[in-house]
Image (cartoon, rainbow, N blue to C red):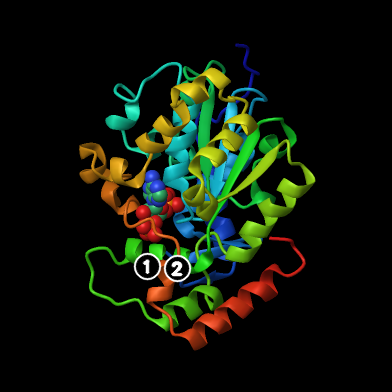
Amino acid sequence: MEHPNFTIPTSTEDLDQEVQELLLSLPREEGWFMSAKLCLYQGFWWPDNLLRNVICAQRHFQSHDQDIIILVSFPKCGTTWLKTLIFSIVNRSRYTSSNTPLLTTPPHKLVPFLELDVFDKKEPPVDLIGTTPSISPRLFSTHIPYSSLPESITKSNCRVVYICRNPFDVVVSWFHFATEGKPGKLDEEHFDSFFKRQVAVGPFWDHVLGYWKESLEKPHKTSFFMYEDLKGDIVFNLKRLAEFIGYPFSIEEEKRGVIQEIADLCSLKKLKDLEVNKSGSYLENYANNSFFRKGEVGDWANYLSSTVMQRLEKLMQEKLSGSGL
Ligand code: PAP
């Protein structure tokens, strides 16, 4: 397969200097459950330490019509799950469920984040984004909001898959992720502050609505999935997903139960019990097992009184009003 010629930076020292200067000029705040400060860049709150990578991705990432599928999410909306599903769909003729790399490699390593993995390096990995990437099709993920995506993604024909989740379950999930191993109890104030304070890659509503609108305007380019829908009918949604990314299941595959096999392989229970996901850590900071918890829909109801629940539901309706979401 031919790949376009594109330049990747041999060194990003100039960019580092530029970002340091930019950081001084941007609004900065303490973030919700973040140890790093957040800065407001293009309308969204980014941890200081990721801004450079986002800018580097915006300037240097080149997508290619056929071979890239970009998986986008607000954190804690089902990123890890979607990575395993897309990886399995795309590679189903290469691997079976007994030899898939998913059994031995954490999902985040198989589908790297642009801003956390690919452009985190001083010299971005040439095997992945150089002129002749060793992997095809390339699969990437990102938390970058639509309006800040590298132009090459929005202008090319590569597919964008977005996964969204009920924000109240996102709060629960994020709380447990952030307080892992530390004392703390999730209370109603945490929910309030998630919507009032600065949250990494937030505001949540703007993130979701940016991709929602895009999926309505260009359904062939961006497809919008809900975590809850995947939970409700995984087979139906896997078919939809496979079709959208250009790897539809054949009737013969359906009959052989290939879809259900992928669903089972990527189930929370299966992934959580794998040794590779039980131990070790992703990017040093995050234990691999912290990406696999309960995976329940509606867990938030266990933490909220009906009064607060009603108030937050009203807030959600206001924020999403008129969007059709
Ligand atoms: P990230 O954006 O930081 O990568 P992400 O994977 O989106 O995190 O979110 C983790 C959530 O997805 C966890 O939800 P919980 O805290 O409510 O339990 C995690 O359990 C859930 N999750 C991970 N893998 C799966 C899966 N295979 N099926 C369903 N849910 C999953």
Mark 1: amino acid:
Phe
Tell me the number on the disc at residue 171.
2
Q: How many marks?
A: 2
User: In the figure, 79 relative to 38: above or below?
Assistant: above
Question: Tags 2 and 1 in contact by the CB under 8 Å rule?
Answer: yes
Q: Of helix, strand and loop, which one carries label 2? A: helix
Task: Depth check: give the residue in front, 183 or 220.
Answer: 220
Q: Where does the image place residue 242, in percent across and percent down from the top left? A: 57, 31
* Side (left or right) of 178 relative to 235: left
Quarter of the rendering containing residue 188: bottom left
**112 over 313 or under it: above or below:** above
Q: Is mark 2 within 8 Å of ligand 1?
A: no
Residue furthest front in the image: 255
Tag shown at residue 223? none
Task: Determine the CA span between mark 2 and mark 1.
Answer: 6 Å
Other residues around mark 2 within 10 Å, as few (<14) / some (14–19) / many (≥20):
many
* Between 267 and 54, the one nearer to me in the picture: 267
Q: Is residue 34 visible?
A: no
Q: Nearer the viewer, residue 321 or 158?
A: 321
State which quarter of the image contains the N terminus.
top right
Q: Which residue is mark 1?
A: 175
Identify the residue at horizontal 51%, vertical 25% (top origin). 254
x and y, in percent, of residue 68 in the image: 59, 28
Q: Is residue 264 visible?
A: yes
